[in-house]
Amino acid sequence: MNENNGKGIFYGVIGVATLIVAIIGATFAYFSASQEDNSTIKGEANTDLASGLSISVSKVKWQGVEEKINENLVPAKFGKDSKSIDTEEVNKALTKKCISGGFTGCHVWRIEAESAQDLTAASIYLDLKVNGENVEDETKWSYAIFTTDSDETSYNAETGVENLIASQVTEKDTFNSITGLGTNIHDSGTVTKDEKIVYYLLVYLANDESTDQTESVKDEKGKYTGTVTFFASGTGQVKATFVAGA
């Protein structure tokens, strides 16, 4: 009788220990996945010399906006197409934190590059694809590159951004305009040692307010992928890739 009680206690202890290990393991797995999902995407260098270069991409999170509604894009109501979108139109979207009527009209990504040495000429290439492929036909998938004033004290990748104001739109077009390595958003420009170069990427589905939004973008579905490449002649390159969408 005592022997059976002893076995019961033993198996009970083993069962409780197993449950505790399972709970700890599940909690750790969730924490790791959450950290990975929220982390800044950093590039990897292709040569030893390129290790002095760094590039990263982080999705701009807005304070006061639920993350769950910030993934799937709906047609943007900027009022201008991808050829004519300007700083004023970009700031309309930023003021609304990309949200219109409870839906998401755009995504904003922060691209940050840095070098451990002065560079007389460097390039940052941007490539954008839908469902892993180049967009060959006419498309509403559009982008705009913009910069802000040098003072970015309000930017915080972890807690979210309270506001963001574009000072200049430097590039704008549709995804299908991009060929080869990508569009050069820092066209052979100089780079100062240990000084961050920051660009912002706005991704949206262009749409004229006078057209039927549902009809005009009914075929514009999928997951888009972006790749940024920081290239310096004679040094090498560093590359980072990010993914978003349904």
Image (spheres, rainbow, N blue to C red):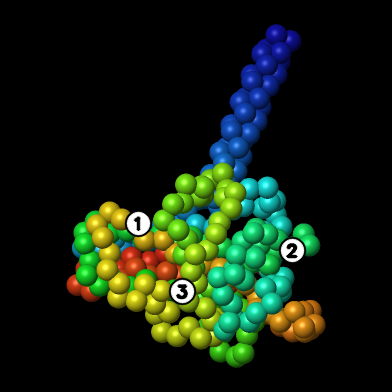
Res. 11 visible in picture = no
The quarter of the picture where the C terminus appears is bottom right
The residue that label 2 is drawn on is 100
In space, the residues marked 1 and 3 are separated at their CA atoms by: 17 Å
Residue type, numbered disc 1:
Lys
Residue 10: in sight, yes or no?
yes
Label 1: which secondary element: loop
Amino acid type, residue under disc 2 in the picture: Ser
Relative placement, left or right, of 121 versus 97 is: left
Image side of residue 215 versus residue 149, left or right:
right
Q: Quadrant of residue 75?
A: bottom right
The dot on residue 137 is: none
> Can you say which quadrant of the picture contains the N terminus?
top right
User: Label 1: which residue?
Assistant: 196
Q: Give x and y (percent) for residue 116.
A: 24, 56
Residue type at numbered disc 3: Thr
- In the rendered structure, the answer to whether residue 74 lies left or right of residue 240 reads right
Which x, y percent locates residue 172?
52, 78
Q: Nearer the viewer, mark 3 or mark 2?
A: 3
Q: Which residue is located at x 49 percent, y 64 percent?
A: 167
Of the two numbered discs 1 and 3 on the same chain, state the one appearing first in sequence: 3
- Disc 3 target residue: 170
Q: Position of residue 19 (x, y in %)?
A: 65, 30
**Contact, CB < 8 Å: mark 2 with mark 1?**
no
